[in-house]
Amino acid sequence: MELLRNHIYKPKRLLYYIVPNEEQMKDFYNGKLPECLVKYDGKFGTYDCPGLIRVTDENGTRELLGIEFRADDSSIEYPDDLECIELGGSFMITGLFTKDTQIDAELIQQGIDSIINDDKENPFRKEIKPKVDSPLVQIYTYENKNRILVQAVDIPKDKFFKTVEPVTDSEKNLYNAAFHDPITGHFNWNYLKPIISGYAYMDVQDFAFVHFDVKDFNTINLVYGHDIANQVLTRITKHMSDKDWIYFSARCDNDNFAMMIKDMSIEETKKTLEDFFAELSIFPEDRHYNIYYRVGVVPMRNCLLSGDRVSDAGKLAQRLGTKINETEIIFYTDKMHNDLDWAKKVKAYLEVAIENDEFLVYLQPKYDSSCERIRGAEALIRWKYQGKELMPPFRFIPIFEKDGSISKIDDIVLSKVCSYLKKWKEEGLPLYPISVNLSRKRMGDENLVNHLTKIVDSYGVDHSLIDFELTESAAYENQDYMVSVMLELKERDFKVSMDDFGTGYSSLSLLTVMPIDTLKIDKSFVDGIGTPKETYKDRAVIKHIISMATALNLTCLAEGAEEKQQVEKLRDFGCELIQGYYFSKPLPVEEYEEKLKSSK
């Protein structure tokens, strides 16, 4: 069994538990835990999610279902409906594996044996080794992963920290160079990193972790000079040293800092950090300039379970700060890590998925509002991931847009649509335009139009049957180039639509310069009409969009119509095409084809 290994330290804690019956054990192996434990998951002061704990003591070996809390804390609301025992502090060797198979007692034992018998040294601390007859084993199952913890051998402090007291001037200079930042005189990351692993030896019971940087620090360097910028860094380190809720801190590199802080509730942590960074936002050298920060916070429980990887979690949360003129405090969640893992997984698997033809095209019909007959369709991508589940676009499209591989997805959709149109033409079925998405990430490709034309021409499809959809927001990055792409597509007789109209900020000015055929009204405008919540503003906005499109000789299409009353209102307002669940959900190609046959 392949396990992803790490080590963590769990301090002295209280285990609140039940002795499970046979049915409850069966439920645990199926990923279900008793409500009496689940209700405490995520409560302030918990060290882990509920799990199976195997305890060996003078009373023998017992298997318990329970949840751990920090001990001796009057601010914690401890369970009053569960049994309780105290567990001593110890290092734990962790083994992580995915839920590719159903877990059971045999699989768990294999995992335990794998950890105990693994002769590889711990990649972080070679002295941390599992106890052969471990008195404590913990098993957790959550989301798509399983985790096994095995108690490690006890390690004296002098074995964990090799403490050296510098005596000579030469030794002191070396010590300062190794563990202190030369600009601020504060501790550096070399000093803080081993403390994170061995906090138990530093009279710290547990902690939350903060990693932050100064937004636009380069501007301070360039405009005010290096000396002023260094004063900013020094003020930050002094401020960290002055706060009693900060246990340890460091300047890591450049304008990046890290802190181990007291565990508090999310609300209290946020308020404390807001006040802390508000004090640091003042720039004495220029009262008109405010300094802002990008802050990643790893809550205590995540710190405990991340071990040496806690700084990665803090940086991950920190990187999600994207706003400019404000300090952002972002709390790390397991979802962030899961999303990152998922993104790596699907990116690595993309070429295999393409080779296996796992991407499918669904077609959502567009209907003529006056006669309620099909007049076209929109091509929507779906992914039959590994030949199993049918995955919706939001699970993978943003990932491929970010790394640029969205072009491969766009090409797959276009090729499949062209193959359908070619087939239907040969079979004598009615042919209507099909719209395909053109990602804004492709707008930098100078050969884009030639590339798209080559795909369509390889199937012998009439250009007028392909409608390229671009979102309104796609125009903001390079409007002139976007217009040139649209003009070139139009010159080759392709149709062009603007999708999600009304969701951006420059809509009206765009309409005067963009050579489009169809204006698609975003669903958010359609939702309000034809319902009990409809207001005169809802009616006014959508009526004016439709009348404006008509005045500009554009076809107007409303998407997201789900109710008969919405369709009737849109028809009365003069909207020509309607797309939505009232007429049809997105269909597999075979079902759309049947609709074409019935419309002959």
Image (tube, rainbow, N blue to C red):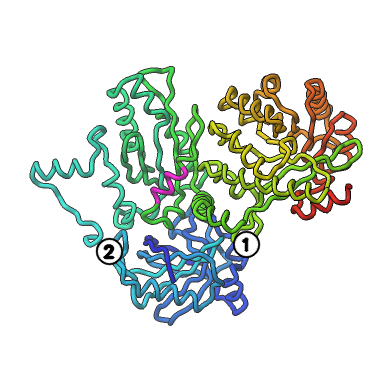
Residue that badge 1 annotates: 387
Q: Name which quarter of the figure residue 173 lies in.
A: top left
Residue at the image point whose x is 86% and y is 33% from the top: 570
Q: Position of residue 224 (x, y in %)?
A: 34, 19
Asked if residue 554 lies in the magenta stretch, the reply is no
Q: Nearer the viewer, residue 176 or 269?
A: 176
- Sooner in the amino-acid sequence: mark 2 or mark 1: 2
Residue at the image point whose x is 35% and y is 39% from the top: 257
Question: Are the residues at dot 2 and dot 1 in contact (C-beta closer than 8 Å)?
Answer: no
Residue that badge 2 annotates: 126
Secondary structure, mark 2, is loop
> Left of 370 or right of it: where is 52?
left
Residue type, label 2: Lys
Q: Position of residue 345 (x, y in %)?
A: 51, 55
Mark 1 packing: few (<14 Cα in 10 Å), some, or many (20+)?
Answer: few
Residue at the image point whose x is 56% and y is 36% from the top: 441
Q: Is 410 placed above or below 552 here?
A: below
- In the image, which residues are magenta? 310-317
Quadrant where the N terminus is found in the figure: bottom left
> Left of 513 or right of it: where is 541?
right
> Left of 38 or right of it: where is 114?
left
Secondary structure, mark 1, is helix
